[in-house]
Amino acid sequence: MSEIEIPLSRPDITTLEIEMVTRVLRSGRLSNGPMQERFEAMVSRRAGTDHAVAVSSGTAGLHLVLLALGIGPGDEVVTTPFSFIASSNCILHVGAKPVFVDICPASLNMDPALVERAITPRTKAILAVETFGNPKHMDTYAAIAGRHEVPLIEDCCEALGASLNGRAAGSFGRAGVFAFYANKQITTGEGGMIVTDDETLAEACRSMRNQGRPIVEPRMPVSEDDVPEPSNVASSLEHVRLGYNYRLSELHAAVGVAQMSRLDEILERRRGVAGAYLDRLMGNPHLIVPTISPDTIMSWFLFVVRLVAGYTPEERDRIMRGMQMHEIGAAPYFPCIHLQPFYRSMFEFKAGDFPIAESVSQRTLALPFYTRLRHSEVDLVAQTLELMIEREQLSRA
Ligand SMILES: *Cc1c(COP(=O)(O)O)cnc(C)c1O
């Protein structure tokens, strides 16, 4: 198969990122260094939190947060079935049980009323996902979590830079986790970041990402070229708790620092691409385009449309394959987590358990979406999509 001409996503890497990585390689300090601290400071500032802990992936970050909160076997975590699998797998990683609740068809995030109803004495956290970069309801989940005295964990892996009523994604819960895989708004190749105001939680995560080493106090630099050992590294071989190797290398952190310095520019360009899609597809009677409520500033992760009610999953799949045949990326974000073979066999979930999530999931189509997607390409994608929909209409008749 030839390479897809307009792919689903493409990282935005400039000479700045390349120079930063080169600088790290020349420095001789490839792990546990100053780049990680710079990256952490930039992300915590953006999320409006006191602390940030860089980790090797978003999944690793979620795992550490659940561990730090002491969630384990016998515990329940209320979460969404309409997400990337990692938001639910982290609950299984600590031996707890995901309790899914259905979504709101506009925001595609959990329906707050259902969240409230799903809470039992065994509930130890609410794990909310900002689906496709939409922070809608995060304040409501935080209020519910507060009322029931359980922590809110924000899986903001898709939402760096989003805000709700002026409050930044990452700042709603006891902790938030961002991710920097290659298709996210900004990338480090692989990477993640825990953000929190809770110092004890941050320190536990710092220690666990580094094999359970104790945290030592930072030493003030004594001269210009004195680079103190960062606060999160004890070089000792003392291990005070069960830890992991979830560190982010200095090379990755360097890419992150460069990407963060360009975040506003990147988000602005993505907003422009999303706007072009919205203008082009809003009037199409076969499609539902993303609805953004006025209190919300999206951080556009993907651009996902869905076919209107009545379209079958088979029709959606044919439309998707038709686009791919025309060298245009398209993907069915997201298949429901509870219907994944592994989850079905483990928990005996079945079709119909979460009807809104399932119905949405069967009709979604993610379109090519990245910083430098040209408006002429948006037009070509839209044209091809319309053509494929028309073809389905003809074959129906
Ligand atoms: C990307 C993502 C993650 C984490 O992914 P990693 O590949 O581990 O960095 C977690 N949850 C959601 C909702 C995501 O989109």
Image: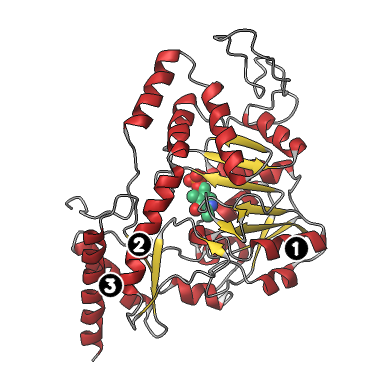
For label 3, being within 8 Å of ligand 1 is answered: no
Total number of numbered discs in the rendering: 3
1 vs 3, front mark = 1
Residue at image location 24% in from the left, 75% down from the top: 386
In this view of the protein, can residue 28 be seen by the observer? yes
- Residue furthest out toward the bottom: 397
Residue at image location 33% in from the left, 66% down from the top: 277
Which colour scheme appears in the figure?
secondary structure
Instruction: Say above or below: 79 vs 92.
Output: below
Q: Quadrant of residue 118?
A: bottom right
1 vs 2, front mark = 1
Counting residues from the N terminus, which is met first, the one under dot 1 or under dot 2?
1
Q: Quadrant of residue 286?
A: bottom left
Q: Residues within 10 Å of mark 3 (few under 14, many from 20)?
A: many
Q: Which residue is mark 1?
A: 143
Q: Quadrant of the C terminus?
A: bottom left
Residue at image location 32% in from the left, 55% down from the top: 8
Q: CA distance from mark 2 to mark 3?
A: 10 Å
Q: Amino acid at mark 2?
A: Ala
Q: Residues within 10 Å of mark 1 (few under 14, many from 20)?
A: some
Q: Which residue is mark 3?
A: 319
Q: Amino acid at mark 1?
A: Ala
Towards the viewer: 379 or 346: 379
Residue at image location 52% in from the left, 74% down from the top: 106
Q: Which mark is residue 266?
A: none
Q: On the rendered structure, is 325 left or right of 265? A: left
